[in-house]
Amino acid sequence: MRDTSLVFPLRKDGSVLLGRKRRGMGLGKWNGFGGKIEPGETMRDCACRELQEECGLLARPDDLKAVGYLYFHQPSDPTWSHGGVIYFLHHWEGIISPSDEMEPAWFSMENLPYNDMWEADRIWLPMMLSGDQIHGVVYFGEDGNHVIDYFFEAVGKS
């Protein structure tokens, strides 16, 4: 699989914009906005394109702050395994709007819907939101839906 980007817009009050997946892998789960890199794109270009497609926000590549690198490993299907760059975003333009793929909503830090997110997100997202830059690996079960193990390491401060 091609590498992916993931963007989490953050407001000055600390709230986080998430999107609930309306179709495809992760249906019903809350997550950041992102997807697969296309030929000729940089990862930052990919992140900006996916953000606009999924929730209508416009971002400049230079405004993305890389806060993590994760490798998503699927032992039963190595063609699915891929790397992902996670970004925080504090400056954007546009009006938030739902897409056929994502339903966006703002959440305060205290009320993030961790029970409706990927299992490993409950560990790495709070680490990043507290200021750690993270590298790690997430291992998925054969069904591609359940996390069976993970390893995260703080490699610096954002």
Image (cartoon, rainbow, N blue to C red):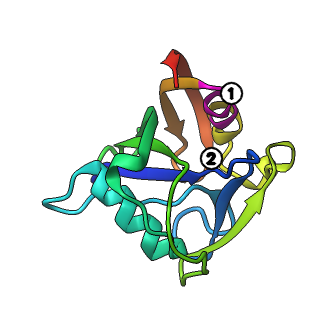
Magenta span contains residue 129: yes
Q: Could you say which disc has been placed on residue 34 in the image?
A: none
Q: Could you say which disc has been placed on residue 146 in the image?
A: 2
Q: Residue furthest bottom?
A: 100
Q: Position of residue 16 (x, y in %)?
A: 69, 52
Q: Give the residue drawn at x 61%, y 35%.
A: 148
Q: Give the residue drawn at x 27%, y 53%.
A: 2
Circle count: 2
The amino acid type of the residue labelled 2 equals His
Q: Give the residue drawn at x 66%, y 59%.
A: 17
Q: In this rendering, which labeled residue sits more in front, label 2 or label 1?
A: 1
Q: Could you say which disc has been placed on residue 130 in the image?
A: 1
136 shown above or below 18: above
Q: Earlier in the sequence, mark 2 or mark 1?
A: 1
Magenta span contains residue 155: no
The amino acid type of the residue labelled 1 equals Ser
Q: Position of residue 71 (x, y in %)?
A: 41, 35
Name the secondary structure under disc 2: loop
Q: Position of residue 34 (x, y in %)?
A: 45, 59
Query: Taking the image as drawn, is residue 1 in sight?
Result: no
Query: Taking the image as drawn, is residue 119 in sight?
Result: yes
144 shown above or below 20: above
Q: Could you classify mark 1 by the number of other residues whose Cα lies within 10 Å: few (under 14), some (14-19), or many (20 or more)?
A: few
Residue extent of the magenta highlight: 125-131
